[in-house]
Amino acid sequence: MQSVLTDSLEKVLGPSAPRPAALIGGAHASGFLGEVLSVQVALRLEPGEEPGPVHLHLGGPLAHRATAHAVRRVPVSHPAPKDADEHYLVTAPGEYPDLLEPLDGAALRLEPGRWESVWIDVIGQDEADAGEHPLTLTLRDEAGRQLAEHTARLRLHPHRLPPLAITNTHWFHADSLSTYYDVEMLSEQHWELIRSFLASARAMDVNSVLTPTWTPPLDTAEGHTRPVVQLVGIREEGGQYRLDFSQLDRWLGICRELGFEGIEIAHLFTQWGARFTPAIQVETADGLEHRFGWHVAATDPEYRRLLETLIPALREHLDRVWDGAVLWHISDEPHENQIEAYRAAKAQVEDLLEGAQVVDALSSLEFAEQGVVDTPIVATNHVGPFLEAGRHPWVYYCVSQNRDVANRFIAQPSLRNRVLGRQLFVHDAPGFLHWGYNFWWSQFSLRPIDPFEDTCAGGPFFGGDSFAVYPGPDGTPWLSLRHRVFAQAMADHRALTWLAELTDHPSATALVDEGGTLTYSSFSYDVEQHLRARHEVDERILAALAG
């Protein structure tokens, strides 16, 4: 067996030996208490070699803080655009590493002739864990014979990073959970799944959650309806709307317990034009009525009548029971030829949302300057004019941001995922948005998919765009490489923010802006340079604290 100790930014693709981990500041991985430190062991059996199951044994002072995962390949039918830039790892369809399957003491089974890897996470919990520690990674066969052994040098600083100072939201799709696991919407089983998967989002440092006050009108073909998930009960009695917030309060309680700092109210109008109303159910004396949806125009007077009751009551209720931020959305991604429809929809609610924070994806500086969107969230490949105008907007990326900029596609190197943390810091972005934390549907939600078999939303999206977490057995979230690396990007941001507070922003920026050349579309792919810069940030923090 061949084996290599490597770091968390290496993707072990299979054909060739991976890059060995570098010792940086005397450690293969370093960070603060509560921060996830990760390393990998890459393994290769010679063709024809069949040693049977392989067992991983962890040793050292932090072994009890470690968890191990087998890195599994998943099918990627659409890895990259036809005009992919030079920094994709692969561009042809195939099976590529992404899924982290918990080992929990189980044996590894390796395919001969191909490099595989094991991912190890270590989280220091208290000051007793601080210091420099060896973590031994020993692989043995069924008979107990040693096949390989490596020692990862870990360094844990005796402090905790401050919380993330920006909004980080990856839209949560509650209907994916009920559909994949085949449980009734908002049943006890569904609530257990919601809690479990929201906890996994917090592990990616997601701190704001899209909340299905009514079924979010997102990624849905016109005339088609996703499974209804509506936390606000609405009943019409005597021509008046009556509201029930009990299910919403249960959702807020989970968010509060897990440490979410903000919620986003579901969009008030449909996506890509704001021409229609969301799918909203109303209880009547004659039963449940699908009163609003594609069949009702955005400017319909009856919808306005509902909103005149719903929005003020919801705002007043949240003011009483929720201490965190509340973000509102009008409609997602209005195109330039849809601005008038967006304006008309916004006019329906503008007076009702006075003083509220309204954020929406809109990448045209011209329309942003006209105040079409109160707080624009700008695609990373369109943010240049905003920066040149002295603005520091929220940013987002999705399937369309596929050339030159950071993203999290399976076919891209992990550094292209992680660099976002320093980009957001350098450019003073107040928030980041991604549309798909767990979107397990085909494009336009026409049918559910099995994310273990389809990572491309039925084909049109690049692998990994639509979700960062897999639905493991028994309702257990199984994470991805991209999930763990994105959390590292946010840890980078937290460290930089802390250093800026301890010293000043220009000093912190100088450590990561690559000589002033770092932009959203230009950055170094040198992994060791990136890790050394993070090491220097940590050293400056420690020096400032000591001083």
Image (cartoon, helix red, strand yellow):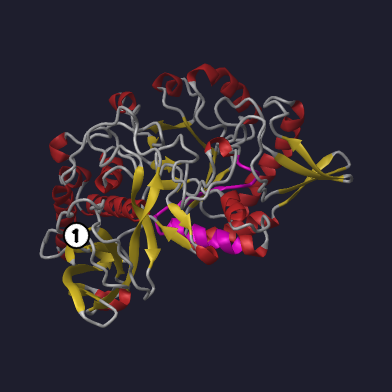
Count of numbered labels shown in the rendering:
1
In this orientation, which residue lies closer to the viewer: 458 or 443? 458
Residue 425 on image: x %, y %: 28, 43
Mark 1 residue element? strand
| x 75%, y 33%: residue | 305
Residue 150 magenta: no
Q: Amino acid at mark 1?
A: Thr
Query: Which residue position holds label 1?
Result: 6
| x 28%, y 34%: residue | 520
| x 43%, y 21%: residue | 369
Within 10 Å of disc 1 (Cα), the crowding (few <14, some 14-19, many 20+) is: many
Please give left or right for residue 174 compared with residue 508 in the image.
Answer: right
| x 50%, y 45%: residue | 171
Please give left or right for residue 143 compared with residue 244 in the image.
Answer: left
Looking at the rendered image, the quarter that the C terminus falls into is bottom left
Please give left or right for residue 407 compared with residue 290 in the image.
Answer: left
Q: Where does the magenta region start and end?
A: 191-216
